[in-house]
Image (cartoon, rainbow, N blue to C red):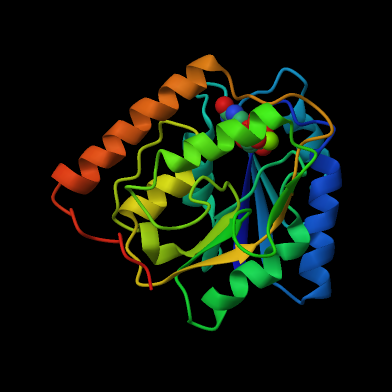
Amino acid sequence: MDLTVVIPTYNEAENIPILVERIFKVFHEHSLDGEVIIVDDNSPDGTWEVARQLKGTHNLGVLRRVDKRGLSSAVLDGFQMAKGKIIGAMDADLSHPPEKIPELIRPIMIGESDLVIGSRYIKGGNTENCSFRRKVSSKIATLAVTGLTNIKDPMSGFFFLRKEVIEGVEISPKGFKIGLEILVKGKYKKVTEVSIIYSDRKYGASKLSGSVTLDYFSHLLRLYHHKFLGKNRIRNFYHE
Ligand SMILES: Nc1nc2c(ncn2[C@@H]2O[C@H](COP(=O)(O)OP(=O)(O)O)[C@@H](O)[C@H]2O)c(=O)[nH]1
Ligand SMILES: [Mg+2]
């Protein structure tokens, strides 16, 4: 199988049918042998049930977790189930355009890259419909990681990688930024950014809260510690 797209969900019942249709349309149009895995943490709005009803003819897996909560751990559980040679993640809230998937996986498919990030902050990328507050907090969060990576949008939740990049790597299930964790700890030679237009959610609410922000900074401290005091200090800072 070419690729697996993992979608973490929490209260995304309105978004998920629209997103799933768009992804499989893209797979079909580009003759991609792909699967989608939705990892839902027992959403009160029944996202897992809505997702199960979409299975039909689609190559769609639904994991309903009742004992766990958290974005990064959901993506990791999805990766465990993945059958694709290329694995990746995207948000459920229609912020990430699935039509970009072929462009994102191409450098990996042709062996030019190991990890590809959908980037808002390179030429051609942008954010739409985002409040000023949200734009500023995203920029601050991104500035805070400049010592960890020179990637322009390391906080992106839209990314793909060769499965081997995280094989045998200890990836923390805590936190909201699994892509950043992979950028810092993953085994890769080349990482590429591909521009995307990010559009803020129309339906449902963001799960980013005060406690998530605190978690974010403690996560960053752990990653800085890993990078500068850990065993693999120099790995992956400079990307050509
Ligand atoms: N499974 C799971 N998914 C989550 C959790 N928190 C957020 N998500 C999903 O992760 C994605 C990003 O979350 P979102 O609230 O849009 O974050 P924001 O875009 O940073 O405001 C969405 O698809 C959410 O439904 C969680 O605790 N568990
Ligand atoms: Mg969102």
Q: Is residue 65 visible?
A: no
Quarter location, residue 97? bottom right
Quarter location, residue 187? bottom left
Q: Using the image, determine if residue 111 lies above or below residue 4.
A: below
- Front one among 187 and 183: 183
Q: Position of residue 146 (x, y in %)?
A: 38, 47
Residue extending farthest to the bottom is 110
For the N terminus, the quadrant is: bottom right
Q: Using the image, determine if residue 216 lies above or below residue 39.
A: above
For the C terminus, the quadrant is: bottom left
Q: Is residue 171 visible?
A: yes
Residue at figure coordinates x 79%, y 40% from the top left: 16
- Front one among 233 and 3: 233
Is residue 89 toward the left or the right of residue 199 in the image? Answer: left
Q: Using the image, determine if residue 80 lies above or below residue 109.
A: above
Ligand 1 occupies quarter:
top right
Residue at figure coordinates x 82%, y 70% from the top left: 28
Residue at figure coordinates x 65%, y 23% from the top left: 42
Is residue 42 toward the left or the right of residue 58 in the image? Answer: left
Q: Position of residue 51 (x, y in %)?
A: 77, 38
Is residue 240 toward the left or the right of residue 5 in the image? Answer: left
Residue at figure coordinates x 80%, y 31% from the top left: 13
Q: Position of residue 182 (x, y in %)?
A: 40, 51
Quarter location, residue 143? top left
Q: Position of residue 211 (x, y in %)?
A: 49, 16
